[in-house]
Amino acid sequence: MKKIILDVDTGVDDAMAIMVALSSPNVEVIGITCCHGNTPLDNVVTNTLRVLQVCKKTECIQAAGSLCSAVNSCEQLPRKGRTGRRPGSRTSSQDQLQGRKAAAALSATVPFSCSGDACGHRPAHQPGRGGSTHPDFPKKLKALYIMGGNTECRHSGRGNTTVCGEFNFVADPEAAHIVLDRYTCPTYIAGWEFTCRNSLPWVSLLRLQKARSKDYREKETTEGSGFNSCDTYAVAAAVDDEFILEKEEVAVTVELEGTHTRGMMVLDYMGLLKKDHKAFIMKKVDLEKLKKMLITALK
Ligand SMILES: [Ca+2]
């Protein structure tokens, strides 16, 4: 049984990724940590708990995490009974939110995370927060799966938030840098351009299409006319070792300076950074498997 920790900023694509993980055979989600990103932390926690309620999986460990970036001071984090949520927005399962910071919750998994995978839907989440996770946590992970970063700046410089920066990395470049620098387990990255190119044709996802509004479809369409559920690529790779068909191994880091390039992922094809650890950049995946995973998740 694969043990997986999800680190999310739920988010539509995070919600789908969580559902894929929960519905995958031979996978045990041993924890879900929440971080601000797509929406403020309060909303992330609420959204995540609602997904768990729908899936009837509220027993999954929950821990709220960072409100801030890696280099800024943190505010008090939400805890059980003190969530800082809007009145009336509380879900019935929110009492199951564990009163721990996410970094502490992740550290608590160290004794049994030797066989675990972590899906950081954005690398800027808890692992990069001021190094507050247990020092053995990065070493104990079996693998790390990340959605984020852009990979083609050497050609055209394509971002989705800044000129050549992808949202997750741009949201917290220092945290992304820490994760890519210190986490030396096998690291698989679903970059922004990759997810755009592997958008699923709407015609093959009629069930999904019927469930979504026109506004949603337009918002989530990024290249061509497909459906891009970004975070789901990272989870699909984590739950199925045969999902990735082609990958490229290269050292990566994150640009921390620059007026236009801060937060850009840098691929060191020439080996100038002298990094021993290299990441696997996803190039081609089994989209038929992804379709089946999404349909199974909706069931
Ligand atoms: Ca996300």
Image (spheres, helix red, strand yellow):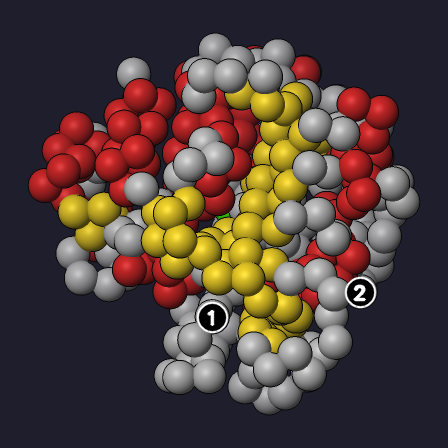
Circle 1 residues within 10 Å: few <14, some 14–19, many ≥20: many
Image point (35%, 23%), residue name: 297
Is residue 262 in sight in this rendering? no
Q: Mark 2 points at which residue?
A: 71
Is residue 212 in sight in this rendering? yes
Give the structural element (helix, strand or loop) at label 2. loop
Image point (64%, 41%), residue name: 143
- Residue 287 location, x and y as percent? 28, 42
Q: Mark 1 points at which residue?
A: 151
Residue 28 vs 186, above or below: the answer is above
Give the structural element (helix, strand or loop) at label 1. loop
**Is 166 on the left-hand or right-hand side of 245?**
right
**Residue type at the position of mark 2:** Val
Separation of residues labelled 1 and 2 (CA atoms):
24 Å
- Residue 172 location, x and y as percent? 65, 63
- Residue 213 location, x and y as percent? 19, 40
**Is 154 on the left-hand or right-hand side of 156?**
right
Q: In which quarter of the image is the N terminus?
A: top right
The mark lying in front, picked from 1 and 2, is 1
Q: Earlier in the sequence, mark 1 or mark 2?
A: 2
**Residue type at the position of mark 1:** Thr
Using the image as rendered, state which of residue 190 and residue 279 is in the foreground: 279
Circle 2 residues within 10 Å: few <14, some 14–19, many ≥20: few
Q: In which quarter of the image is the C terminus?
A: top left
Hey, which residue is sitting farthest right in the picture?
Answer: 135
Image point (48%, 11%), residue name: 56
Image point (85%, 52%), residue name: 131
